Image (spheres, helix red, strand yellow):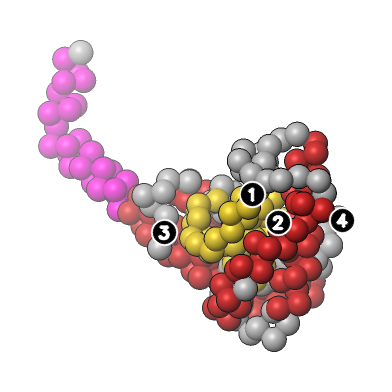
């Protein structure tokens, strides 16, 4: 015990302890700053569609997919001429009432009387995977559609860059779609979300997951 006390009192030990602590603080601040920056950049690059089912019953989940299909079909007719995310959001905002009408009509045609809440905003998402593309936790702009009580499992996709219109039943996003994503993202952003197995990219993605899951650290608008 006496040896331990003497070591603790040693000026060199104190200096090393202080430097170690300062290095830890500096590293943490850098990691948080990096996560905030990339989270903000990804949020600025991506517009998502988020559909939440009334419940987890098989019927309500099937209904969710039918509403989803109709919304994607309609959105696909609106955005072919859109060149960037802001144009897509503006077009979606302009036709927000139509999205709600389409969802309601689909629900009624399937024999249900659920109400629908449709809004565009900046919402928190956990880490999500779309085929071989992964998006870290954080706040993203999205068109959110809540069916009935909205207590069931949700479904999501990326409206811009346009992944909602891609069949990923193989579990792999086609190269053509990835190319379009690359054109609308920085090299760093695309490397982080694509199927890159390098240790450096995996570490950076983990930083985004760690800090992106804490709302006070993410780039919320």
Pointer 4 or 2: first along the chain: 2
Q: Main secondary structure of the magenta part?
A: helix
The residue at the far top in this view is 1
Residue 188 position in % (x across, y down)? 56, 69
- In-front residue for pair 20/178: 178
Residue 110 position in % (x across, y down)? 82, 49
Q: Are marks 3 and 2 in contact (CB under 8 Å)?
A: no
| Residue shown at 69% from the left, 79% from the top | 79
Q: Are marks 3 and 1 in contact (CB under 8 Å)?
A: no
Distance (Cα) linking label 3 and label 1 = 28 Å
* Residue 93 visible in the picture: yes
Residue position for label 4 = 170
Residue position for label 1 = 115
**Which one is closest to the eye, mark 1 or mark 4?**
1
Secondary structure beneath label 1: loop
Residue extent of the magenta highlight: 2-26
Q: Please tell me how crowded label 3 is: few (under 14), some (14-19), or many (20+) other residues with Cα within 10 Å.
A: some
Residue position for label 3 = 220
Distance (Cα) linking label 3 and label 4 = 33 Å
Quadrant containing the N terminus is: top left
């Amino acid at each position: 015990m006496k040896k331990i006390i003497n070591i603790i009192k040693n000026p060199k030990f104190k200096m090393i302890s202080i430097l170690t602590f300062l290095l830890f603080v500096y590293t943490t601040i850098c990691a948080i700053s990096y996560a905030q920056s990339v989270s903000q950049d990804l949020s600025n690059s991506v517009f998502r569609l988020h559909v939440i089912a009334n419940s987890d019953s098989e019927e309500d989940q099937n209904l969710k997919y039918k509403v989803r299909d109709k919304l994607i079909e309609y959105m696909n007719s609106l955005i072919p001429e859109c060149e960037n995310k802001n144009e897509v959001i503006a077009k979606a905002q302009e036709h927000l009432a139509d999205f709600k009408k389409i969802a309601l009509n689909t629900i009624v045609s399937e024999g249900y009387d659920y109400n629908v809440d449709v809004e565009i905003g900046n919402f928190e998402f956990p880490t999500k995977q779309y085929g071989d593309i992964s998006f870290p936790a954080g706040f993203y702009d999205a068109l959110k559609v809540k069916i009935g009580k909205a207590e069931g499992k949700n479904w999501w996709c990326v409206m811009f860059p346009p992944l909602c219109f891609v069949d990923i039943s193989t579990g792999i996003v086609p190269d053509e779609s990835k190319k379009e994503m690359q054109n609308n993202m920085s090299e760093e952003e695309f490397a982080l979300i694509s199927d890159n197995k390098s240790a450096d990219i995996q570490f950076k993605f983990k930083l985004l997951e760690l800090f992106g899951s804490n709302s006070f650290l993410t780039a919320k608008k």
